[in-house]
Image (tube, grey):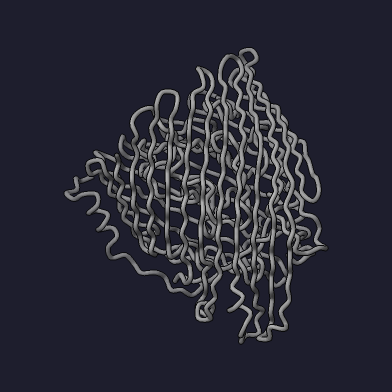
Amino acid sequence: MPRQKCSTLALAAACLAGLPSAAHSQLPPVTSVSSPNSNIFDPKTAPIIVIHVGAHRLVLVPRTVAGAQVIHLNPSDSKTNQDFSHLITSTIAGAAAAPSGEFHIRGSHGQYTYYLDGAPLPASVSGSFSDLIDPKNIETLRVLTGGFPAQYGNNLAAVFDVTARAGKTGPPGGFLQQNVAQYGIADSAAQVSGGIPHFSYFVSGLRTFSQRRLDPVTQMPLHDSGRDSVVFGKFDLSAGANDKIVLDTARTNAFLQFPNDAVQQAAGRNVTQREDGDFANLIWRHAGGPQNLTVALYSHQSRLRYLGDPSHDLIGATTDAPLTSAFEDRTANYIGLRTDATRKIGERHKLGYGFDLSTVTGGEHFTLLTNTDADPANTASTVDNHDLSGGDQSFYLQDDWTPGRFLVNYGVRYDRHKTDTTTSQVSPRLNLTYTANSRDKFHAYYNRLFQPASIEDIRRLDPNAVPFKPERDSFYEVGYQHDNGGITTSLSAYYKTVQDVIDENILGGTQIREPFNVQKGYVRGLEFAVDGSLTRNLSFYANYARSWARAAGDFTGGLTPQGAPPGYFYEDHDQTHTASLGLAYEKHGQSINLDGEYGSGFPYGQSDAGLPNFYRVPAHFIFNLQVATRIGRGQLALSAFNLLNHGYVIKQASQFSDREWGQGRTVGVKWTQNF
């Protein structure tokens, strides 16, 4: 390549100049949907994806079993401005970007389990739009999408196992950071860490503001501001040669507006939501001799207040269309105790066992008002005021057996979930990995899964509704991985049969989501991934996934129409083709990153025969660019999200979701000052 006589930032400015304008705001044409004929204790062998979360460089070096990826970022990785959802959708095969920071992995609705430094992190109350974990606070992220050891339960479309950043012995150090971008985006962040012998600390703060907080119903955001703040701290105490005590704690709060269309904006519609949460994990680790032990006491409190603007939605209406107003005050308080232990037995066996006990309390105060004309006397109401209570108990036993070239992870777990009713399941797990030689690995998994809906998700809006049921799955996967000269290629195929599929829809005229069950379903897919380094300074990755997620049978629970559609239909979160790619170059303190995401579109609508989700929104392909240069102890970065300004609909309005547009080109500048 010829040598360029311009700086990295100048090159970026040239790339951003003269790009095409946004697409017109009318809905693009639609297309018809065609009919389809580890060991977690040992990172060297675990069937996981590991993401070292950081700033601007993606250097991909796989190190685990077939089908897995290991993504290393630049060591000065505290400067990332990605949110958690973009981090996942831009790197994980089969992860499809959905509206307002959501994502779907392997045809799932959104059933994820989070762990922080070995302690569970329960989900926030239903309807929250705040991230549980901010990437700036992550040191290592392990992502499991299959081959789950018996250690893991609850929601298992994916497991996000986070190791938070920690301080180091020495004087305080950290950084200050400011990012500004289009749509009124302003992000301020700070981190400081340090320590003395036997004790270290890490503290961070983040405050963000945007005039495009949620994906809007039109291309031009209207009534769409939001602000978020997060304060996080991690404190490590060495209590002897073999013992460590860790405290993770955080406080979050957010205020956001729900977007309007032009008619709603003219009428002065003002729907808002406030979110608050805090968590604390106290963890004791003992490592010494043949047995290791972790004991974690965890808690998580969250609250959501939704205000549906009755003064404009119900009074003075001039349309015959149904109008709605909703009010909600929802709280959930989790307290739990978890233990994980391992014991080495001989040369070829490592036994793992433990339990997880948790309780949840809280409350749901909900009112839904509907009106079909301009007369307030014709308003009808649906009310749900009740306390939340329940809990989960689980126990597991597993073994890692290494006969010859095989790694055999096998085990069993028992889960008991209590809400209005009590359900339970015994789940066997078997995960095999065969190392043929230094370059080739094969794997095969069978996992029985039990996935209850979070207790705080369940509402009692219809007294005659069938009780909400947990989802029960049988998961199968086979795969192959080949490593050749630092470039790793992997191919996986998976199939999952589902009983009592969990999904959710939007209550009419609101942004409140209501879960429901579909009698049965299946998910199947193929995934291909390749990554590595082209030169010492240039790395790359690319992945592609083909997915089918379909359901059939009776709709039960929630406020969905009861009964069964005619035959199998695509679920609204199914995306047939999903792909992502990335290139990263870094030399002498300057870097360029280019990544792209492709999605063939989510389904919506209904066929003439009554089959749901018969059409799809058009496909989209967006590119994102970031360039950065080091200046003394600081770094200046210029970024462009959706570089080509491609206008696209993420989801179209249906009984399962509202219409939402993807984000247009967003140019930003970020300065980071280290100290």
- Residue 625: x and y in percent read 35, 53
Left or right of 188 on screen, residue 415? right
Looking at the image, which residue is at 62% across and 85% down? Answer: 319
Name the quarter where the N terminus is drawn: top left
- Residue 488: x and y in percent read 45, 35
Name the quarter where the C terminus is drawn: top left
17, 579: nearer the viewer: 17
348, 436: nearer the viewer: 348
Q: Is there any visible trace of residue 489 in the rendered image? A: no
- Count of numbered circles on the image: 0
Left or right of 614 on screen, residue 591? left
- Residue 417: x and y in percent read 75, 43
592, 630: nearer the viewer: 630
Left or right of 143 on screen, residue 5? left
Looking at the image, which residue is at 46% across and 69% down? Answer: 221
Farthest residue in the left direction? Answer: 5
- Residue 619: x and y in percent read 50, 62
Looking at the image, which residue is at 61% across and 87% down? Answer: 318
Q: Is there any visible trace of residue 123 in the rendered image? A: yes
